[in-house]
Image (spheres, coloured by chain):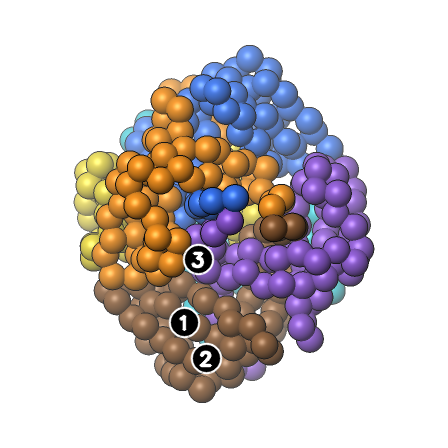
Chain colours: A brown, B purple, C cyan, D yellow, E blue, F orange
Amino acid sequence: MRVSARNKLPGVVQEITTDGLMAKVSVRIGDNHLVALVTAEAVKEMGLAVGDEVTAMIKSTSVMLAKGD
Amino acid sequence: MRVSARNKLPGVVQEITTDGLMAKVSVRIGDNHLVALVTAEAVKEMGLAVGDEVTAMIKSTSVMLAKGD
Amino acid sequence: MRVSARNKLPGVVQEITTDGLMAKVSVRIGDNHLVALVTAEAVKEMGLAVGDEVTAMIKSTSVMLAKGD
Amino acid sequence: MRVSARNKLPGVVQEITTDGLMAKVSVRIGDNHLVALVTAEAVKEMGLAVGDEVTAMIKSTSVMLAKGD
Amino acid sequence: MRVSARNKLPGVVQEITTDGLMAKVSVRIGDNHLVALVTAEAVKEMGLAVGDEVTAMIKSTSVMLAKGD
Amino acid sequence: MRVSARNKLPGVVQEITTDGLMAKVSVRIGDNHLVALVTAEAVKEMGLAVGDEVTAMIKSTSVMLAKGD
C-alpha cells in the first residue's frame, strides 16, 4: 500500500497506555522516541502490543520546525 | 522554552524547496528523513538554511500508526 | 496493512490538480466528494491518476461536527 | 454560514460515547461511517444526540490517500 | 450553526494572498493577528475579501502551548 | 527559539482540567479564550499552572474560516 503521507518512520512499540477512549503509544524510531495518541479502539483493532514493528505516519503539514534556543 | 508537543526530534536541514506560499523542508533525523510543509514566510523569518540544526515538533495527535504489510 | 486512523473511506479519484509543491485530489466517496490536499511529490510517487481506487484516511481528531443552520 | 473547510459531509449521528474530557461520535455518511473525536464539552454544548442531522467538516490538509493493498 | 470546534475567534480579514492552490488569509483578532492557510478555492467560494467579518475556528487538539523563553 | 508556526498568541492560563491521558487547558488571549487539548504528561512536564504566561502556537494549516450566520 502506498500512502500520500510523506513521513513513514519504521519503529518498535515500547509502551502502550490505554485510558478510556484514548491510548498513548510510545514508539522507538532509531535513537528517538515518538508518542502517538490514538483511539483505544485503534489499539484493540490493530492488536497492537509492545514489541510490534510499526510505521509511524505523519503528514508533512503536521510537522513544525523550531530553531535556536 | 518548554512546549506541550510530545515529539521534539533534533535534526539537520538537508533541503529547502520554496514555491509561492509554501516551502518543503527536508530534515535528517538520525537515519530517517522528515519532510515538513511550512509557509515560505516561516522559512524566511527563521532564516532557515541547509545545514541548520532544527527541532521537528509534532503533536502526538498528529501521528498515525500502521502495522503489517 | 492495518492503520490506527478510524476513518478509511473507499473512493475513486475524479480530478487531480497539481501546482508547485501541492496537489488537490478530488475523490468520489459514494454520493459525496472529498478533497485531499497532498504534496505534488506524493501524487507522483503514488502514480496517482484519475480513475484510481483509493482509500481516504482521516484521523478522528481531524473531524469537526456542525449542527443546525 | 460558509466555511473554508472543503469537506462538508452531511450525516446522521449513530452513537455517542463520552469518557472524561473526550467524546467519540459515530456518524453515518451515506454508506460509510465516520468517527469524530471531539471534546465532551462540545457534545454537551451542541446538545448532540443520536439521530441528529450533522455535517462532518474536514480540512483538505487533514485527508491522506492510500492506494493498493 | 453550532460547531464542535472549541475555538471560535471573531475577527476581521486584513490581507489575502492567493498563489496557485493555496491562499494565506490574515485575520485581526483583538490585538492579535491570526494567519489561516486555506485553499484558493475556499476564498473564492466564500467571496472572502479584506474587511470581512469572519470567525477563525480551531480544534482544541490543534493548539500547542509553550512556556518560558 | 524561532518556530515555523505562524500563530503565536501570548496568554495566561486560566484553568486546567486533567483526566486520564488528556488535559484541557483554557488560556486567556486578550479578550478571547482559547482551549488547548494536550496530554496530561505535557502539563506535568511543563509544570503548567493557573496564572502561567504561555504562548499558544497554531499552525496556519489548522485554522479554518467561517463567514456569515
Identify which amino acid the numbered label 2 is placed on.
Val
Assign the C terminus of chain F to one quadrant of the image.
top left
For the residues bearing labels 2 and 3, Cβ distance under 8 angstroms: no
Identify which amino acid the numbered label 1 is placed on.
Val
For the residues bearing labels 1 and 2, Cβ distance under 8 angstroms: yes
Give how far across and how far down residue A61 sits, in percent. Answer: 60, 51
Q: Quick check: A28 left or right of A67?
A: left
Please give the name of the residue rendered at 67% of the width and 36% of the height, measured from the top-left corner.
Answer: E22
Identify which amino acid the numbered label 3 is placed on.
Thr
Please give the name of the residue rendered at 63% of the width and 21% of the height, measured from the top-left corner.
Answer: E15
Both on one chain, marks 1 and 2? yes
Q: Which residue is mark 2?
A: A13
Protein chain holding label 1 = A
Residue extending furthest bottom? A51
Label 3 and label 1: CA atoms lie apart by: 11 Å
Q: Dot 1: what SS?
A: strand
Q: Above or below — where is C2 with respect to B8?
A: below
Label 2 and label 3: CA atoms lie apart by: 16 Å
